[in-house]
C-alpha cells in the first residue's frame, strides 16, 4: 500500500497542487512587504478561477481566460488598496468582504450565466497548454515528475526567481520593502509609499488571477463552487512560514502542496485525509509562534533614539 | 547684500481642529544659518514640512530665488535643492549606509538593477568631500546616533541639496556630538555655500550657531532678528508671550510624615537599557516635590516605576514604611497612589468613551458604585460625575459626551478630576498643563496646591521650569537617570537648576533625609 | 437618554442602500427586474407565518455568533474563529446526545448546552493565550483553527462517529429527549429561540450594566488606559475570548438540538461570518447586533424565496452583504476625506475674498 501512496505520481501531483499556492503566495508576499497582509486571496483565487473559465469559454482561448482573470484581479487588487490605503480600513475586514463577495458572485454568475448549479464544465473551455521538454524525456523519473505540466507550473518557478531579484536587487524592490518597513523614510526620499502599496496590491490581484486560472484551466477544465478550497489561506500560511521571502515561501508552498497531494492519495486508499490536510494550518500557528518570539527577542536600536548609560 | 533665497509668503495651514500656521511670512537669506525657535506646538515643524512638501499649505505661496515654487511632495522640494533631516531619522535600519544614502535615487546597472558598488563609491566620495568618517557598508542599526545623523546629512547632500533643514538636530546628541555637528554646519555654510535652517527650542544653541533667528508662537511668526541683537531673555519673551506672571499660591505650613521613599532604584527602558541609575528620594505628606529635567532623562520611567507600570530591577520602594514587593497599577492604587499621566490620550483617558466612563475608571469595582460586586449603580455614578463636572468646571455638553470632543484643557481636567477625587494620600503628577490653555492651567495649579494643603504628598514632574518653581516645596533635578541635585525651592534659581538638569553640575547622590 | 450615534446610523443606512443598488444593477445586467426581485425578497422574509418563523429560526445562530463577535471585538481581541468554535460546540452536543441517551430532557439538554459552550470556550482560549501571553496575532491563529476544527469534526463524523444510516457525513440522530420542540409547523423555528433570547439578555446585561462589561470596553478602547487604571487587561481579554467561544459553541449546539438533530459535516453555512457581519454593522453594540441579526436572517430567508419565485440566485444576497461590509469598513475613512474636503473648500472661499 505504501507504494500506492508514495510514488513518483505523488511528487508530480505535489508540483501541480503547489502551483496555485505558489502563485498566490508570491502576490501575497509582495503586499506583506508593503505592510498589508492580504487574507482575501481566497476570494481572489476563486474569482480568477471563474473568470478564467468564462474567458476561455466565450473567446475560445485560454489566453483570453487568463487575461480576463488578470483583469478581474487588477480590479479587486485596486479595491483592496483603495480601502486599506486611502480609506484606512482594517485589511482583515476588507479581505473578509472580498472573500464573501467572491463566494457569492461566482455562484450567482454560475447560475445566471451558465445556468448550472455546483459546477460547470464544457468541451468548449480551452485548457491552458502543457509544456513538453524533450530533453527530460530521456530520464524516466525526471520526466514523470517535471515534464508535461500545465504552463503556469513553469511560469510560477520563473516568477519566484524574478520576484526574488525584483525585491532584493532592484531599487523598486527596495522601495516596496521600505513602504512596509518604514514608509516615512521612503516618502521623505521622494518616493510615494502609497504608490508602492497600490502596485503590490495589483500584482497580488494578477497573481491570484493566475492561480485561479491554473486551477480551472490547468488540468481539468471546470469551475466548481468554492473551488479555491482554502488555498488562499494556505498561501497566507506559506507567506508566514517563509517569512515573505520568495524562495522560502516557495519551499513552504511546495511542502503544503505535498501534504495536500498526500492527503488526497490517502483518501483514495481509505485513510482519513483530514489530518494531513490540517498540517498547513497547524504549521502556520507554529511558524507564527517562532517568528513572533524571535522578533520579541531582537531589540533594535533604530530611528535615532537616545541610549542612556 | 543679503540675498533672498527662500520667501514664505502668508503661509497658513489648517488641520481639523487646529490652525498650525497662521499667515507666516518668513525670508531665508542665501548662505545663512537661520534658526527657527518656539515651544512645542508652535508650528515650526509644520512650517518646514510645508517647505519640504510633506504638507500643502492651506493658503500662501513659496518663492525660491525670486520664482514661485510649487512644492507638492518631497520630490518637488528635492528638485528645488531643499533637503530635510528630521527629528526622528528616516533611515532603514536593516539596510546599509550606502543603500540609505542613495534611497530614492539609486544608481542603476543595466537600467533595472541596483548598482551596489556604485552606491558604495558614491557614499565614500561624498563622505570624504564633506569630511565625515563613515563606513558605507555598515548597517544602520549598528551605528551610534551621531553617525546616523551624518548618514542623514549625506543623504540630503547626495540629492544635491543647497538648502538644508535640520529639525531638532541636537535632541538626541551628547554635548560633544552637538559640537561636532555645529562644526559640520559651519563648514557646510562657509566652504560649500549651503544655506542651513535649524528648528530648535534650545536657546543656548541658537545663540551659539545661528546668524538670524525667527521666533514662532501658536502658529504665528512673532519676529525675526539677527542673533547678535538677541539674548535669552528677549527670545524667551517672544517665545512665551508677555512676561509670565505667576502670582504666588497660598501655601500652608503642613508638616508631614514620610509617606513614600525610594532607595537606589534601578530600572530598564523598553529596549533593555538602564534608564534609572540608582534613584533615591523621599516624599512627605503636605509637600510638593518637583522633578526638574529635560525630557528623556528618565522621569517618565520613574513615574512608571512609582505607579506600578514598570518593573524595578534593583533597589527598594517603601510606602508608609512598608516595602513594596508586587509592582502593578492595581496594587499601587490600592496602596493610595493616584496618577496624572504625562500623556492623557495614550494613558489617562479613553477618547472614544464618554465623560462618565472616563471618570469612573478605578472605582468601577468599589461600593457604592457597584452593587453585589458586578451591577453598576448608574444613579450613584452619574451623581458623582455631575458633581465632578461642576466642581472642576469641565466644559462639556453632558456626561455622555465623548471625551475626544473636548478641548485639551478640559480633557486634562477630566483626568485631574478623577485622580483627585480618590482623595489618595499620594499623587504622582506628570506634565499636568501640557497642551492646556492659560485659564485651565491656572485652575489646575490651584487644585494641585489645594491638595497639598489638605495633606497630600505630591510628586510633580514637569518640563516647564516655571511650573516646577511655582508649585514645588522642594526640587530635585534628574539627568541621565540619576538625581543630580536637591534643593529647597526658595534657595535656588532657574539658571542653577538648568545647570543641574543638563548635568553640568552634579551634587553627589544621597538625598539623605534631613 | 443616551445619545444614539446618528451620523453612524446614516452611514450604515447609506452603505445598505448603495449595496442594494449594486445588487439591483447585477440583477438588471442578468435580465431580471430588481423590483420583482426585492419584493420577493421582502415577502419571502416577512410575508407569511411560515416565512416569519423561518426568518427568526435563521436569526438564532446569527444572534449568538454576532454577540460572540461583539464581546470579543469590544474587548480588543478579534475572535475570527467562530466557525471552528461552532463546529466543535455542535459536535460536543451531538456527542452528548448520542452517548447519554437515557437522560431525561431537563438534565440532558442543559448538559449538552453546557458541554458545547465549554468546548467552544476552550477552543477559543487557546488562541487567546497565544495572543495575550505570546503576542501572536489572533486573527490568523483563529482563522487557521477554523479549518482545523472543521477537518477534525469531519474526520470524527466520517470515521468513528459515522452514522450507519446511509451516506450522510453525519452522526447518528440524537436521543429523542434532546430534541428541541418545533414551534411552527414545517419551519425550523424551535424552542432554541427562547434560550437564545435569554442568553442575549444576559450578554446585554453583562456588556452594558456590569463592571465586568465596563472593564471589557475599556480594555478594548484603550488597553494602556485600562492597565493604568488597575484593570488586568490580559485576564479580561482571555475571559472575553472564552465567553466569545462559548457563544459560538452554543450556536452550534442549537443547530444540532433544534434543527438537524444530529451533527452534520456541513452544519454551518458560514453562520459565524454572518454573525461577524452583524456585529460589524452594529459596531459591537449588543442591541444593534440583535437587530442586524434579524436583518441578515431576513435577507437569508428572503433570498431563498426570491430564488424560488424569480430564479434570481440566492447568493446575490452574499454579494450585497459583502458590499455592506466593505463600506462599513471604509466608513471612518470616508468621513475623514469628507472633513478634509470641507477644509479645502472653506479655505478656497476665504482665499478668494482675501485678495
Image (cartoon, coloured by chain):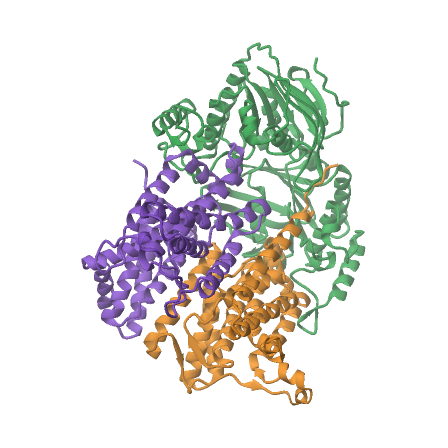
Chain colours: A orange, B green, C purple
Quadrant of the rendering where the C terminus of chain B is positioned: top right
Q: Quadrant of residue B399?
A: top left
Residue B315 placement (x, y as % from top left): 71, 27
Residue B234 makes an appearance in the image:
yes
Q: Does residue B435 appear left or right of residue B259 in this picture? A: left
Residue C10 position, x and y percent, is 32, 50
The residue positioned 75% from the left and 42% from the top of the image is B182
In depth, the one of B495 and B333 nearer the eye is B333
Compared with C254, B180 (above or below) is: above
Q: Quadrant of residue B145?
A: top right
- Residue situated in front as seen by the camera: C82 or B398: C82
For residue C244, above or below residue B368: below
Image location of residue C121, percent across then percent down: 46, 48
Give how far across and how far down residue C63 sits, in percent: 34, 50
Q: Is residue C355 visible in the rendered structure shown here?
A: no
> Which residue: 55% across, 38% down?
B41
Residue furthest left as drawn? C48
Amino acid at each position: 500500500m505504501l507504494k500506492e501512496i508514495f510514488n513518483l505520481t505523488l511528487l508530480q501531483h505535489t508540483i501541480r497542487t503547489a502551483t496555485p499556492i505558489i502563485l498566490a503566495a508570491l502576490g501575497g508576499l509582495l503586499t506583506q512587504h508593503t505592510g498589508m497582509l492580504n487574507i482575501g486571496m481566497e476570494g481572489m483565487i476563486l474569482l480568477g478561477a471563474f473568470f478564467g473559465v468564462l474567458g476561455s469559454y466565450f473567446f475560445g482561448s485560454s489566453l483570453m481566460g487568463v487575461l480576463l482573470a488578470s483583469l478581474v484581479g487588477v480590479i479587486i487588487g485596486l479595491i483592496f488598496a483603495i480601502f486599506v490605503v486611502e480609506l484606512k480600513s482594517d485589511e482583515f475586514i476588507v479581505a473578509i468582504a472580498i472573500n464573501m463577495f467572491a463566494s457569492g458572485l461566482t455562484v450567482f454568475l454560475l447560475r445566471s450565466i451558465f445556468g448550472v448549479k455546483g459546477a460547470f464544465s464544457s468541451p468548449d473551455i480551452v485548457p491552458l497548454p502543457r509544456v513538453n521538454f524533450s530533453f527530460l524525456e530521456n530520464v524516466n523519473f525526471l520526466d514523470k515528475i517535471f515534464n508535461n505540466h500545465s504552463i503556469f507550473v513553469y511560469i510560477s518557478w520563473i516568477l519566484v526567481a524574478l520576484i526574488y531579484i525584483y525585491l532584493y536587487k532592484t531599487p523598486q524592490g527596495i522601495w516596496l520593502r521600505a513602504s512596509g518597513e518604514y514608509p516615512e523614510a521612503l516618502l521623505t526620499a521622494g518616493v510615494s509609499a502609497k504608490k508602492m502599496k497600490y502596485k503590490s496590491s495589483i500584482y497580488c490581484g494578477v497573481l491570484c488571477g493566475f492561480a485561479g486560472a491554473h486551477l480551472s484551466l490547468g488540468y481539468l477544465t471546470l469551475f466548481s463552487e468554492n473551488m479555491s478550497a482554502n488555498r488562499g489561506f494556505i498561501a497566507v500560511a506559506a507567506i508566514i512560514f517563509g517569512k515573505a521571502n520568495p524562495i522560502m515561501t516557495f519551499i513552504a508552498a511546495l511542502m503544503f502542496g505535498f501534504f495536500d497531494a498526500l492527503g488526497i492519495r490517502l483518501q483514495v486508499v481509505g485513510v482519513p485525509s483530514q489530518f494531513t490536510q490540517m498540517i498547513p494550518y497547524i504549521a502556520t500557528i507554529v511558524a507564527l509562534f517562532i517568528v513572533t518570539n524571535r522578533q520579541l527577542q531582537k531589540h533594535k536600536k533604530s530611528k535615532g533614539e537616545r541610549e542612556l548609560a | 547684500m543679503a540675498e533672498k533665497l527662500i520667501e514664505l509668503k502668508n503661509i497658513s495651514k489648517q488641520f481639523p481642529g487646529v490652525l498650525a500656521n497662521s499667515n507666516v511670512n518668513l525670508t531665508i537669506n542665501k548662505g545663512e544659518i537661520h534658526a527657527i525657535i518656539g515651544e512645542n506646538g508652535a508650528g515650526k515643524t509644520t512650517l518646514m514640512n510645508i517647505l519640504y512638501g510633506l504638507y500643502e499649505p492651506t493658503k500662501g505661496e513659496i518663492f525660491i530665488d525670486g520664482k514661485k515654487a510649487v512644492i507638492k511632495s518631497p520630490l518637488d522640494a528635492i528638485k528645488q535643492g531643499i533637503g530635510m533631516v528630521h527629528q526622528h531619522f528616516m533611515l532603514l535600519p536593516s539596510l546599509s549606509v550606502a543603500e540609505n544614502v542613495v534611497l530614492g535615487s539609486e544608481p542603476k546597472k543595466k537600467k533595472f538593477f541596483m548598482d551596489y558598488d556604485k552606491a558604495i563609491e558614491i557614499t565614500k566620495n561624498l563622505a570624504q568631500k564633506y569630511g565625515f568618517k563613515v563606513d558605507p557598508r555598515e548597517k544602520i542599526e549598528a551605528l551610534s546616533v551621531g553617525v546616523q545623523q551624518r548618514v542623514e546629512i549625506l543623504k540630503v547632500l547626495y540629492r544635491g541639496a543647497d538648502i538644508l533643514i535640520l529639525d531638532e538636530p541636537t535632541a538626541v546628541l551628547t554635548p560633544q556630538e552637538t559640537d561636532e555637528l555645529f562644526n559640520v554646519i559651519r563648514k557646510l555654510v562657509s566652504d560649500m555655500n549651503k544655506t542651513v535652517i535649524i528648528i530648535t527650542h534650545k536657546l543656548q544653541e541658537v545663540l551659539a550657531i545661528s546668524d538670524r533667528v525667527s521666533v514662532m508662537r501658536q502658529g504665528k511668526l512673532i519676529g525675526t532678528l539677527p542673533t547678535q541683537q538677541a539674548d535669552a531673555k528677549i527670545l524667551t519673551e517672544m517665545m512665551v508671550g508677555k512676561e509670565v506672571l505667576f502670582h504666588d499660591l497660598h501655601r500652608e505650613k503642613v508638616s508631614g510624615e514620610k509617606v513614600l521613599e525610594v532607595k537606589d532604584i534601578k530600572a530598564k527602558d523598553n529596549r533593555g537599557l538602564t534608564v534609572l541609575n540608582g534613584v533615591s528620594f523621599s516624599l512627605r505628606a503636605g509637600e510638593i516635590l518637583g522633578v526638574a529635567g529635560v525630557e528623556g532623562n528618565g522621569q517618565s520611567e520613574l513615574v512608571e516605576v512609582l505607579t506600578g507600570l514598570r518593573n524595578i530591577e534593583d533597589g527598594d520602594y517603601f510606602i508608609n514604611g512598608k516595602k513594596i514587593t508586587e509592582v502593578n497599577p492595581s496594587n499601587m492604587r490600592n496602596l493610595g497612589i493616584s496618577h496624572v499621566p504625562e500623556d492623557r490620550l495614550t494613558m489617562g483617558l479613553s477618547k472614544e468613551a464618554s465623560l462618565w466612563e472616563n471618570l469612573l475608571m478605578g472605582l468601577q469595582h468599589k461600593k457604592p458604585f457597584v452593587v453585589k460586586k458586578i451591577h453598576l449603580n448608574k444613579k450613584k455614578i452619574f451623581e458623582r460625575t455631575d458633581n465632578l463636572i461642576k466642581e472642576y468646571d469641565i466644559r462639556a455638553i453632558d456626561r455622555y459626551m465623548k471625551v475626544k470632543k473636548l478641548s485639551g484643557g478640559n480633557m486634562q481636567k477630566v483626568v485631574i478630576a478623577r485622580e483627585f477625587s480618590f482623595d489618595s494620600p499620594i499623587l504622582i503628577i506628570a506634565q499636568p498643563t501640557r497642551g492646556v490653555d492659560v485659564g485651565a492651567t491656572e485652575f489646575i495649579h490651584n487644585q494641585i496646591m489645594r491638595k497639598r494643603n489638605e495633606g497630600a504628598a505630591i510628586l510633580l514632574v514637569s518640563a516647564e521650569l516655571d511650573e516646577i518653581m511655582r508649585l514645588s516645596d522642594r526640587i530635585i533635578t534628574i539627568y541621565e537617570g540619576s538625581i543630580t541635585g536637591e534643593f529647597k525651592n526658595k534657595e535656588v534659581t532657574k539658571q542653577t537648576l538648568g545647570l543641574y538638569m543638563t548635568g553640568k553640575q552634579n551634587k553627589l547622590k544621597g538625598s539623605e533625609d534631613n | 437618554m443616551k445619545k444614539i450615534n446618528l451620523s453612524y446610523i446614516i452611514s450604515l443606512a447609506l452603505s445598505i442602500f448603495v449595496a442594494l443598488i449594486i445588487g439591483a444593477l447585477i440583477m438588471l445586467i442578468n435580465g431580471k427586474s430588481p423590483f420583482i426581485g426585492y419584493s420577493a425578497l421582502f415577502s419571502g422574509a416577512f410575508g407569511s407565518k411560515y416565512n416569519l418563523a423561518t426568518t427568526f429560526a435563521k436569526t438564532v445562530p446569527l444572534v449568538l455568533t454576532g454577540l460572540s463577535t461583539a464581546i470579543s471585538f469590544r474587548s480588543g481581541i478579534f475572535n475570527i474563529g467562530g466557525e471552528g468554535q461552532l463546529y466543535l460546540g455542535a459536535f460536543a452536543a451531538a456527542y452528548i446526545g448520542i452517548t447519554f441517551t437515557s437522560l431525561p430532557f431537563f438534565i440532558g439538554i442543559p448538559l449538552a448546552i453546557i458541554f458545547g459552550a465549554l468546548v467552544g470556550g476552550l477552543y477559543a482560549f487557546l488562541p487567546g493565550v497565544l495572543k495575550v501571553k505570546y503576542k501572536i496575532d489572533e486573527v490568523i491563529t483563529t482563522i487557521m483553527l477554523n479549518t482545523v476544527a472543521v477537518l477534525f469534526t469531519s474526520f470524527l463524523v466520517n470515521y468513528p462517529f459515522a452514522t450507519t444510516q446511509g451516506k450522510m457525513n453525519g452522526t447518528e440522530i440524537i436521543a429523542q429527549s434532546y430534541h428541541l420542540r418545533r414551534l411552527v409547523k414545517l419551519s425550523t423555528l424551535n424552542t432554541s429561540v427562547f434560550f437564545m433570547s435569554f442568553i442575549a439578555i444576559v450578554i446585554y446585561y453583562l456588556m452594558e450594566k456590569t463592571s465586568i462589561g465596563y472593564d471589557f470596553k475599556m480594555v478594548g478602547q484603550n488597553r494602556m488606559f485600562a492597565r493604568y487604571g488597575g484593570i488586568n487587561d490580559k485576564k479580561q481579554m482571555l475571559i472575553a475570548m472564552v465567553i466569545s467561544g462559548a457563544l459560538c459553541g452554543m450556536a452550534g449546539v442549537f443547530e444540532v438540538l433544534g434543527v438537524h438533530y444530529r451533527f452534520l459535516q456541513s452544519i454551518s453555512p458560514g453562520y459565524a461570518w454572518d454573525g461577524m457581519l452583524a456585529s460589524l454593522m452594529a459596531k459591537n453594540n449588543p442591541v444593534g447586533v440583535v437587530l442586524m441579526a434579524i436583518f441578515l436572517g431576513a435577507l437569508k430567508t428572503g433570498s431563498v424565496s426570491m430564488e424560488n419565485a424569480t430564479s434570481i440566485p440566492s447568493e446575490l444576497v452574499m454579494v450585497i452583504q459583502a458590499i455592506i461590509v466593505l463600506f462599513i469598513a471604509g466608513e471612518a475613512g470616508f468621513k475623514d476625506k469628507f472633513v478634509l474636503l470641507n477644509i479645502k473648500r472653506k479655505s478656497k472661499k476665504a482665499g478668494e475674498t482675501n485678495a
